[in-house]
Image: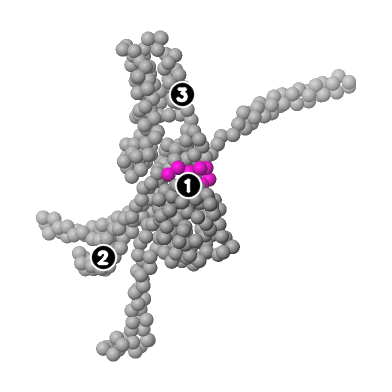
């Protein structure tokens, strides 16, 4: 049985997927918890076939051709055919759109408090107890406008800072939030990736850099000193594993990680020719499993970091005078809170039935070429015969 869509364990494609994902199951965070849908299906199909074999039956995986070799008595093969046919089906394709923003915490507060009254209502969908991304409420939204109820999961509410805590936004809500956040001068759009993946397969988006965090000093037996720069991968990493349900909804297993290197305040003393401070890696991460409809927007936030900036003001020339110059110099330290917001929108990509029509049109075009050639030859022969 040569499999068309799913992969046997040990196939070249399956091994390559394992290497890319960095784990045996390709799961989120290397734990196989959601991204190993492809690998798990192959194991299940072998187990399913083994479950209907007789005591004389045997199943062998053939990785080079992505096939199953089944040996058994003839009476068992009709059931084996049905099992393989029911499991070896194409997976749905999912287009994942992500918008990753680095915004000021002040902008988040403004989004919940000072929203214009002309945009008074917003459709909100969600049934989870959450205070993200706005503080002040952990209640779900009811179907009645401007009221809240713990028992309901869908509704329309008045835009109020005290009664607003959406976790899953409609397209309208996402567009309003994005438009407002992008209008802020200090908002940084880190990335706007679009990834097409299969249902049950993991898509990963990384915006990282290898940042120097310190220096190590080593000395061999001959007294030779060697300095090595320690580096840590910092930045943002997003892993999403979608699964399309028979109802048309999409279940998403999501992991978002933000890692930054912050100054520890200690100077680098390992090497005299290197200046700077030792940095401490700081990581913030979140994992969640949600179910969305096609086109709904999930907003992930709460990954807050502090950004410290120092500025020095001085009076020219006078500030450089010893002792007296310190009176004409000043240092200002400003600490701001910034938050990473991730908007995720899944779309089911459906295969249209237009491909057979294209194939048919190609055949018709190929058939028309001999017909036109035949007309030309006939016309030429008629002309020759008349002469």
- The tag on residue 153 is 1
| Badge 1 or badge 2: first in the primary sequence | 1
| Badge 3 or badge 1: first in the primary sequence | 3
Residue 188: % across, % down: 46, 61
| Badge 3 or badge 2: first in the primary sequence | 3
Q: How many numbered tags mark residues here?
A: 3
Question: Quadrant of the rendered structure where residue 176 is?
Answer: bottom right
| Residue 362 visible | no
Q: Nearer the viewer, residue 281 or 378?
A: 281
Q: Nearer the viewer, residue 213 or 183?
A: 183
Residue plotted at (29% across, 86% down): 326
| Residue 83 visible | yes
What secondary structure is found at the residue carrying circle 2?
Answer: strand
Question: Quadrant of the rendered structure where residue 13 is?
Answer: top left
Residue plotted at (53% across, 45% down): 295
What secondary structure is found at the residue carrying circle 3?
Answer: helix
The residue identified by callout 3 is 86
Q: Which residues are magenta?
A: 290-296
Q: Residues within 10 Å of mark 1 (few under 14, many from 20)?
A: some
Instruction: Tell me the CA gap for discs 1 and 2.
Output: 45 Å
Residue plotted at (29% across, 58% down): 281
Instruction: Tell which tag, 3 or 1, sits nearer the viewer.
Output: 1
What secondary structure is found at the residue carrying circle 1?
Answer: loop
User: Is residue 292 rendered magenta in the image?
Assistant: yes
The residue identified by callout 2 is 264
Q: Relative to residue 328, is residue 73 depicted above or below?
A: above
Instruction: Tell me the CA gap for discs 3 and 1.
Output: 35 Å
Instruction: Tell which tag, 3 or 2, sits nearer the viewer.
Output: 3
Instruction: Tell which tag, 1 or 2, sits nearer the viewer.
Output: 1
Q: Residues within 10 Å of mark 2 (few under 14, many from 20)?
A: few
């Amino acid at each position: 049985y040569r499999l068309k869509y799913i992969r046997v364990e040990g196939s070249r494609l399956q091994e390559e997927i394992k290497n890319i994902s960095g784990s045996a199951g390709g799961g989120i965070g290397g734990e196989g918890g959601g991204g190993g849908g492809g690998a798990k299906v192959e194991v299940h199909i072998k187990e399913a076939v083994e479950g209907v074999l007789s005591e004389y039956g045997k199943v062998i995986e053939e990785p080079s051709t992505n096939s199953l070799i089944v040996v058994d008595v003839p009476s068992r093969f009709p059931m084996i055919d049905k099992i393989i046919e029911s499991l070896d089906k194409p997976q749905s394709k999912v287009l994942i759109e992500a918008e990753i923003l680095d915004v000021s915490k002040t902008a988040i507060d403004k989004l919940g408090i000072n929203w214009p009254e002309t945009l008074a209502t917003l459709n909100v969908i969600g049934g989870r107890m959450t205070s993200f991304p706005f503080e002040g409420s952990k209640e779900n939204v009811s179907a009645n406008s401007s009221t809240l109820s713990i028992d309901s999961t869908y509704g329309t509410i008045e835009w109020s800072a005290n009664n607003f805590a959406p976790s899953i936004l409609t397209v309208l809500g996402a567009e309003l939030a994005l438009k407002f956040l992008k209008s802020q001068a200090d908002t940084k759009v880190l990335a706007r990736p679009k990834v097409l993946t299969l249902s049950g397969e993991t898509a990963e988006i990384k915006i990282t850099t290898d940042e120097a965090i310190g220096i190590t000093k080593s000395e061999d037996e001959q007294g030779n000193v060697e300095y090595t720069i320690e580096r840590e991968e910092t930045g943002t990493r997003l892993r999403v594993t979608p699964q399309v349900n028979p109802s048309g909804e999409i279940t998403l297993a999501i992991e978002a990680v933000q890692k930054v290197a912050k100054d520890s305040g200690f100077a680098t003393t390992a090497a005299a020719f290197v200046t700077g401070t030792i940095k401490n890696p700081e990581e913030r991460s979140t994992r969640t499993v949600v179910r969305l409809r096609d086109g709904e927007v999930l907003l992930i936030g709460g990954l807050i970091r502090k950004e410290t900036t120092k500025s020095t003001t001085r009076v020219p020339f006078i500030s450089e005078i010893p002792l007296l110059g310190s009176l004409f110099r000043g240092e200002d330290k400003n600490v701001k809170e910034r938050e990473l917001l991730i908007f995720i929108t899944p779309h089911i990509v459906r295969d249209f039935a237009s491909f057979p029509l294209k194939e048919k049109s190609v055949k018709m075009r190929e058939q028309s070429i001999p017909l036109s050639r035949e007309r030309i030859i006939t016309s030429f022969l008629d002309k020759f015969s008349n002469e």
